[in-house]
Image: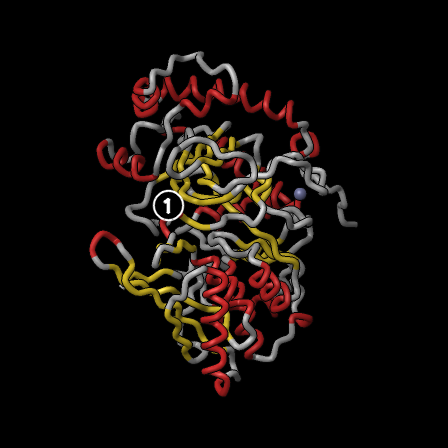
Amino acid sequence: MTDDRPFWDKQVETISRDELAALQLARLRIQVDRLYHGSVFYREKLTATGFEPGALESLDDLTRLPLVTKQELREEQVSHPPFGRYTLVPPRQWAELHPSTGTTGVPVATIWSVRDVNVITDVTARTMWGVGVRSGDIVQNAFAYGLWVAGMSVHYATRHLGCFVIPIGAIATEQQIHYLRMAGPTVLFSTPSYALHIAERLKERGVAPSELSLRVGCFGGEAGTENPATRAKIEDGLGIKAYDYFGLGEIGPTMACECTAKVGLHWSEDLHIVEIIDAVTRRPVREGETGIVVLTHLDRDATPMLRYWTNDYAKLDTSPCVCGRTHARSPGGILGRADDLVIFRGAKFYPVQVEQVVRSLDGLGDEFRIERRHVGDGVVETCVVVAELAPGAEAQQAGVRDQLQDSLRSALGVTPEVRVEPFGAIERTTFKAKRLIDL
Ligand SMILES: [Zn+2]
């Protein structure tokens, strides 16, 4: 019989906001003390801001502490190889080394202690439980293993939950489809773009979603799952309920997930403090406003992060969720990455906004990319949105092209050039799709 309890850890997930704040402050004090006394890197940063140990009186004091950027971690690991001066536990307690993906430069190495592996496994199991994954489920884990931390954490959590796991990783689509049909997985983990690609290939082969056993999917590694058009395509194409999933190497691979109400990513606030910070003033924005997500570890053992600047834009909602969880949500998920902001003729937009337009037009396939060409000072000279015709839509090419241009104009407030190519012209990826190409 399926366990229908809604919470993995009811006490933690439904804690009152006041009790949560008290828990966070108590854990933050311990963590900052550890950083100050155990890490030269953090002590130098804290001292530079005039911080004295024991000075944290409330959570608001956190905003006075220094931010940490990925570039800083990279430089720290180069100047103090191999892991920088912020590893707080002795090597005999180290369990795993996880480099970041390196999509934005030299990878930064993160270390998980034995205790970190247990905490990460438990919070990942919590997110999976929240979307209805139970013992007896068969999980096809198409998150990359080895290269990418999310593969391992989902693997550990599936075993912790008592699921049967297919550790397939991000390998060729033909094999994904083979196991989807042969082993009957009920749960799929992958990037959203890869889920769409699998759905596209199933359709080409005439395999109906009803022929698969899939029920639930969690999609992370890229923004986009909460785009209504993208979510609908994944859900229809695979016959599942699709949930947004978020994590990042330096913080935790699988630490935020939607609940079945699909109203935004729930953070795990017992383990992380989530701040939304204005990209320019570096001050907290008001609740509901968009800013950069800044994350602080409350319980990380080996390589803790204090106010880590993620470069991801989101907003925060601490109001109660219909699911009963009290932990804050980011409605709409990650709204864009600061690195991916396109500034073109005075308008600013992110690839996810283009994605929403492309995937809402019937005559187009799911893939797209944005090609931009810079002149001096990083000014974008040309910006071309490249999309693909849907299979069988060749006769409508001119009409589809005009429709795309009109829809982009109203969605972005600016009119990029548009090019519509035959179906299949844009390269598919089993990992993170590259949407923004600088020519
Ligand atoms: Zn909820």
**Residue at point 41% right, 49% down?**
337
Name the side, left or right, on which 336 lies relative to 156.
left
**Residue at point 72% right, 38% down?**
324
Of 206 and 223, nearer the camera is 223
Q: Specify few, some or many for label 1: CA neighbours under 10 Å numbering under 14, 14-19, or 20 or more.
A: many
Quadrant in the rendering for residue 418: bottom left
Tell which residue pokes out farthest to the bottom in this image: 395
Residue 193 visible: no
| Placement of 239 over or under 131, stated as above or below | below
Name the side, left or right, on which 408 lies relative to 319.
left
**Residue at point 52% right, 40% down?**
289
| Placement of 339 over or under 381, stated as above or below | above
Name the side, left or right, on which 7 lies relative to 327.
right
Name the amino acid, label 1. Ser
Residue 405 visible: yes
Query: Which residue is labeled 1 in the image?
Result: 100
**Residue 70 image point, x, y percent:** 34, 39
Which corner quadrant of the figure contains ligand 1? top right
**Residue 423 image point, x, y percent:** 45, 78
Of 33 and 63, nearer the camera is 63
Quadrant in the rendering for residue 161: top right
**Residue 318 image point, x, y percent:** 61, 35
Locate the C terminus by quadrant. Answer: bottom left
**Residue at point 64% right, 23% down?**
18
Under tag 1, what secondary structure? loop
